[in-house]
Amino acid sequence: MSLPLDLLMFAGLIAAILIGYPVSFTLAGVATIFALLGWTTGQFDMSLLGALGQRVFGLLTNDVLIAIPLFVFMGVVLEKSRIAEELLETMGRLFGGLRGGLGISVVLVGALLAASTGIVGATVVAMGLIALPTMLRNGYDPKLASGIVCTSGTLGQIIPPSTLLIILSDVMSNAYQQAQFEEGKFTIETISVGQVFAAALLPGLMLVGVYIVYLLVKAWANPAAAPALEELAEAPSRAEIARAILPPIFLIIAVLGSILGGVATPGEAASVGAVGALLLAGAKMNGGSTRVFIAGAAALGILAVVAGISPIRLQREDAGLGSWLLGAFATLLVLIAFYAVAKALRQAAAKEILKPVMTSTMTVTAMIFATILTASVFSLVFRGLGGDHRIEEILSAMPGGPQGALVFVMALIFVLGFFLDFVEISVIVLPLVAPVLILMGHDPVWLSMLIAINLQTSFLTPPFGFSLFYLRGAAPEEVTTGMIYRGVMPFIVLQVVGMALLWFLPQIATVLPKLVY
């Protein structure tokens, strides 16, 4: 009887990751070792590795994944320019008089930052430095305050745009196509990033609502845990609220609206977000003088509308005076926008945030792509050892049929979230289990949202939840690691409640994609 190398390979990967080796090197190393073992035992055909070059080229030219570095840049710019601080301060003054209101303001700011940055680490650290000390000063239970900050920061993974949803859309689209090939279909349907973004909007807002309801109930049942502000600052004026909230909302509308409206591809929409974030940061850093940046944003908006209504093609022989005037007008708009962007870059360089922004963007992007590329190597070897067939056999043998198989997979993802990052689970585990679940009849869009909420929970689960580490680094000394761990436990339960609501009410995830697409 031959050794089950596929199972040993997966166990070896988990063990190596837990020891602490970098994930990308671990994936490639384990794949290489087991490819050689499989070859020597006659269980693996080395000619399969000839497909690696094509796989790598396909990943690096993937139009969906190209959006990742631009969305990361957008989020880092908004974090470094301290726009989050103004949002938190304004919302805290707005809701502070309500029992539990400061916690609610943190949740709402987390939702806004999620939709405009999508970066968990930036959001958790920003709120850990600003909101957590404020809540502690006003008598909040340290455990509750820590849980609120950690959980609100993770909303960046479920509310679009987020790197999780971009990676998930690519993985689930490939799984959906694979499932259709196995069914013998010749007309193959795909899942777009726009569909996944549309599907994630209502579940994301649902989670925000669940958190707020919990905080209100908690504050009512235990007023000492989440008191109203004793020394209430002057309520913000409408102008202050508009100045803090409207710029991120406009940016969200520009990015998501262009994708959901079918006007732009994810890469193009990410470019809009990156430029928009840069203009917002420029206006923030320019000492209150915003005319240039407003003019630049307006110029880009008008240019998009003009190009959409009447494409400018001056190289055509029948181009008349009207075309040339339109071309001149478009050129003027480009120059105005170019000047505004150049000034924003100059401001960022003068304030010494441009270099940290570029460094953070490159670091995060390199980590994500290194994991995706090496996971492709791991997946190829695992399939060559027959791992995909074994996974199919395990899921098919689950009691309860398709529902039982889905419960098993969701439980597996939840447990793996205690040890692995969402990128690792997405690119290692999901390609193996998702095609089987889709073949069993589960809707791929709804399945994507269930998995997305489950993966979001991995940021909260001890001992390796990333939000816990981010907050540990930013929290005051009086907040212990034990307090942070105990503080997130109720919110992990709320995540399970969110998954249950989505399970029994699948329309929450499916109604918007059906309306938009």
Image (cartoon, grey):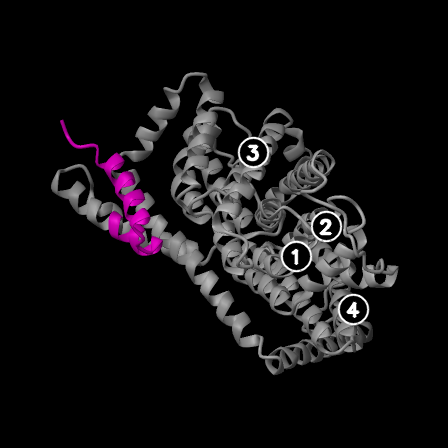
Q: Is residue 194 visible?
A: yes
Q: Which residue is mark 2?
A: 102
Q: Which residue is mark 4?
A: 298
Q: Nearer the viewer, residue 219 or 339?
A: 219
Q: Nearer the viewer, mark 2 or mark 4?
A: 2
Q: Which mark is residue 186?
A: none
Residues in magenta, as a range: 1-30
Tell me the distance, in whole angstroms, between the alpha carbons under discs 2 and 4.
35 Å
Q: Nearer the viewer, residue 267 or 255?
A: 255
Mark 4 Cα-neighbour bin, 10 Å: few <14, some 14–19, many ≥20? some
Tell me the distance, in whole angstroms, between the alpha carbons under discs 1 and 4.
33 Å
Tell me the distance, in whole angstroms, between the alpha carbons under discs 1 and 2.
8 Å
Q: Which mark is residue 493?
A: 3
Q: Position of residue 347 (x, y in %)?
A: 65, 80
Picture residue at 69% right of the left edge, 71% below the top = 279
Mark 3 Cα-neighbour bin, 10 Å: few <14, some 14–19, many ≥20? few
- Marks 2 and 4, the one that precedes in the sequence: 2
Q: Position of residue 45 (x, y in %)?
A: 20, 42
Q: Nearer the viewer, residue 344 or 45?
A: 344
- Marks 3 and 4, the one that precedes in the sequence: 4
